[in-house]
Image: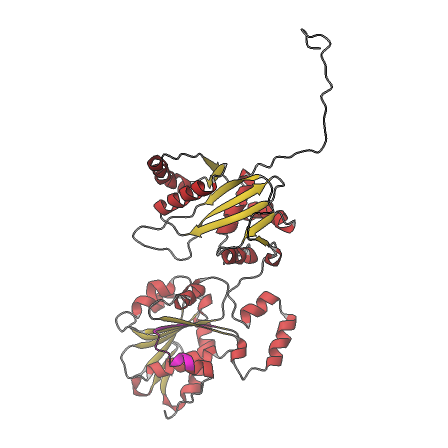
Amino acid sequence: MAGVNISLLPWQEKVINDPARFKVIAAGRRCGKTHFAAVTLILAALDGKPGMTMYVGPTMGLARDLMWDKLFELAGDIIEASNVNNLEITLSGGNKITLKGSDRPDTLRGYSIKHLVLDEFAFHKEGVFDTILRPALADRKGTALFISTPEGRNSFYDVYMNGEAGKKGWKSWHLTSRDNPLLDPEELEAAKETMAGWQYRQEFEASFDAKGSEFFDSEEFSYYETLGDRGNGDYYIAVDLAGFESDRGNKTKRRDNSAMSIVFVDDSGTWWVEDIQYGRWTLDETAQKIFEAVDKYKPISVGIEKGIAQQAVMNPLQDVMRRTHRVFRIELLSHGNQKKEDRILWALQGRFEHGKIKLKQGDWNLTFVDEASAFPSKLVHDDLLDSLAYIDQMAIVPYASDLDFEDEYAPMDAVAGY
């Protein structure tokens, strides 16, 4: 293609040749993502199909800084005109590439887009793609490229997981800075020695993990397979409810999960966490899961966080009780005018440090560790931690004494008693 200076790294060739309509690339710094984004813009603008080719950065200023000069560098002589005020470039044959910022959503309306690049998507204004840009792709069945260095678990993580989950038309790639063969490995090692571990993992290894927890060291968590070493004790079940999924399947992105902790507390005060069930359940599913857990573990106490969600679940839960002729009492839990962060720390931090909480090995472990490792980051849910912390309000530990008290009292008068 005359006048176009295009060269691609191996990973870029692989991605550009993939037929997926929505491509998501989580990439470390200096991986070559901006160069790749510019290449896809130019090729799409020259494909002979009608429609707008659009690049969207976090802001208009960043869009200009990241992409304007790069397009001139690559497109060369085929650029016929440019408007720096509107950030629009016209290529040979009248094909246009326009640069926008997600911070000004109204400037994104009214377009029919055949190819869209969302660069540094982790830093875009929330909801702009879903409400404005996704509909702009509909009439031409346009393609979209999401590309960014992660910033914890936000909207970029959501679209990345679309590809990981194999949703139709979606595909995701994870690339580290080492995937750029032009980057000196010694430079990466030098950065690793001076940067905080979580910073290096995020910026160069494209990790979605948020800043490591200041309070929980997940590497010191204790696990068990069977309850052979526990003493006498009782089961407790604590439920932290979120909003409920509609039966019609209308799902809200990044909404909290409901979580139910099932814990055996022995006479020494050790918590043996048997299971933590979690999910975005309907009212009926929530009631059924609580009832099944109670039926299986026979806890001496079942607690649910007091509030609107608790009130909503009581009717279907009581229906299940009446239908099965099995009735149990619900203890209403409260936050006690404490901040959630303080309540979780007070209930869990000391116990973990002293080995008084043991986790049964199960599929829920990874999610729990993920929450604990990031706590108290707002980028990661804390629903499992929250439900487990409520056990602190419920567990009653009997305290026995080794001292032998003998009752030596003997009444002097059998009638008077003294």
The location of residue 352, given as percent across then percent down, is 61, 50
- Front-most of residues 7 and 332: 332
Disc tally is 0
Q: Is residue 112 left or right of residue 182?
A: left
Find out whether residue 196 is within the magenta segment.
Answer: no
Q: Residue furthest front?
A: 228
Q: Residue furthest bottom?
A: 2
Q: Quadrant of residue 74?
A: bottom left
- Front-most of residues 379 and 283: 283
Q: Is residue 270 left or right of residue 85?
A: right
Q: Is residue 335 visible?
A: no
Q: Is residue 298 above or below residue 412?
A: below
Instruction: Work out which quarter of the rendered image holds the C terminus and state it.
Output: top right
The location of residue 294, given as percent across then percent down, is 44, 41
Q: Quadrant of residue 159?
A: bottom left
Q: Residue at x 44, y 87 (%)?
A: 7
How was this image coloured?
secondary structure
Q: Quadrant of residue 376?
A: bottom right
Q: Is residue 370 visible?
A: yes
The location of residue 21, given as percent across then percent down, is 34, 73
Q: Residue at x 31, y 50 (%)?
A: 247
The location of residue 50, given as percent across then percent down, is 27, 79
Q: Is residue 265 above or below residue 382?
A: above
Q: Residue at x 46, y 78 (%)?
A: 34
Q: Is residue 49 above or below residue 287?
A: below
Instruction: Work out which quarter of the rendered image holds the N terminus and state it.
Output: bottom left
The segment highlighted magenta reads 14-26
